[in-house]
Image (cartoon, helix red, strand yellow):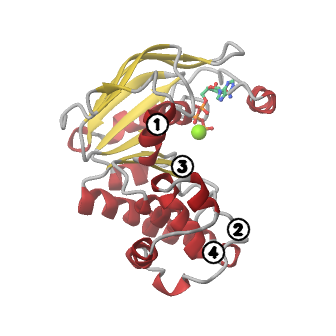
Amino acid sequence: MVAENFIEFKDVGKVYPNGTVGLSHINLTIPKGQFLVVVGLSGSGKSTLMRTLNRMHDISSGDIMIDGQSIINYKGKQLRNLRRKIGMIFQNFNLVKRSSVQRNVLSGRVGYYSTWRSALGLFSQADKQKTVEALRRVGLGEKLYTRADQLSGGQQQRVAVARAFMQDPKIVLADEPVASLDPLTTDSVMNDLKKLNDDFGITVIVNLHSLELARKYADRIVGLRGGELVYDKTIDQVTDTDLDNIYQSEGPEPESEAIVMHSATEGVI
Ligand SMILES: Nc1ncnc2c1ncn2[C@@H]1O[C@H](COP(=O)(O)OP(=O)(O)OP(=O)(O)O)[C@@H](O)[C@H]1O
Ligand SMILES: [Mg+2]
């Protein structure tokens, strides 16, 4: 177990097939159990960075190590094992809206089942029990049989946190998890994530736009600009002025939304 350099980005570069530079010369070492917040303007590379960790995006240069092993050439079983250990939380929750909360949370376990068992929904009693525990952790114990689309946005995000917990993850990646939530709900979701971090030593990486939230929850804040790491401080070193600087003196946006959409529809991610 490599604790101090649990996750290592080594001179990582990512160029999208259309030539857009997503990441450039990223060197970043994340110790086990850290609550890391990544900030930066839209288009600065936050999502790209996060997605390289579970190989939703492949990198163009450099290397990424997790627990002492390079992950960039993982295939098949190794890749499945990697993804099983990484919980993902998205801005839009990514729940199956017409399914029950229970089903959604149980789906966090599918990485532990053979394809046919999970397709038939043959989850073990132990996992059903774990679902109850997972929901209690996020204060939704009574919502087991409710349909996901009957929950508020904040509740849906808390179900997503419960689903991530079901994976027994070593890492949780949350990409702007609270961007569409009100301030009160935001705090409950951030607290749920913090609890995963505190109670189980799970390494949590959160992309946020709000510096105020970053300061409230992070052990460490890193800032991206134009795909480069321009800021990296532990929370006790962070000052008001340097946070202001992260969002100031930006050049023009490197790429337009339209290009992202275009690429996505061509499936060249
Ligand atoms: N699939 C893609 N194809 C081409 N370029 C992309 C793709 N996805 C992202 N990019 C570009 O890579 C750069 C980094 O994008 P990324 O989505 O990582 O930024 P972000 O910091 O997450 O932004 P936001 O705050 O808006 O979510 C941007 O210039 C973006 O346009
Ligand atoms: Mg993003």
In the rendered image, residue 56, in percent from the top left (x then y), is placed at: 57, 34
Q: Is mark 1 on a helix, strand or loop?
A: helix
Tell me if I can see residue 240 in this picture.
yes
Q: Mark 3 points at which residue?
A: 176
Q: Quadrant of ligand 2?
A: top right
Q: Name the residue under label 4.
A: 152
- The earlier-in-sequence mark between 4 and 2 is 2
Q: What element carries label 2?
A: loop
Q: Is mark 4 on a helix, strand or loop?
A: loop
Name the residue nearer the viewer: 141 or 155.
141
State how many labels appear: 4
Looking at the image, residue 72 sits to the left or right of residue 143; the answer is left
Please tell me how crowded label 3 is: few (under 14), some (14-19), or many (20+) other residues with Cα within 10 Å.
many
| Residue name at image x 43 percent, y 73 percent | 138
Q: Are marks 2 and 1 in contact (CB under 8 Å)?
A: no
Callout 3: CB less than 8 Å from ligand 2: yes
Q: Measured along the vertical axis of the image, is residue 166 above or below residue 184?
A: above
Q: Nearer the viewer, mark 1 or mark 4?
A: 1
Q: Is mark 3 on a helix, strand or loop?
A: loop
Q: What residue type is labelled 3?
A: Glu
Q: Which mark is residue 77?
A: 1
Name the residue nearer the viewer: 116 or 48.
116
Q: Residue 97 carries which label?
A: 2
- The earlier-in-sequence mark between 2 and 3 is 2
Looking at the image, residue 25 sits to the left or right of residue 215; the answer is right
Q: Are marks 3 and 1 in contact (CB under 8 Å)?
A: no
In the rendered image, residue 166, in percent from the top left (x then y), is placed at: 43, 63
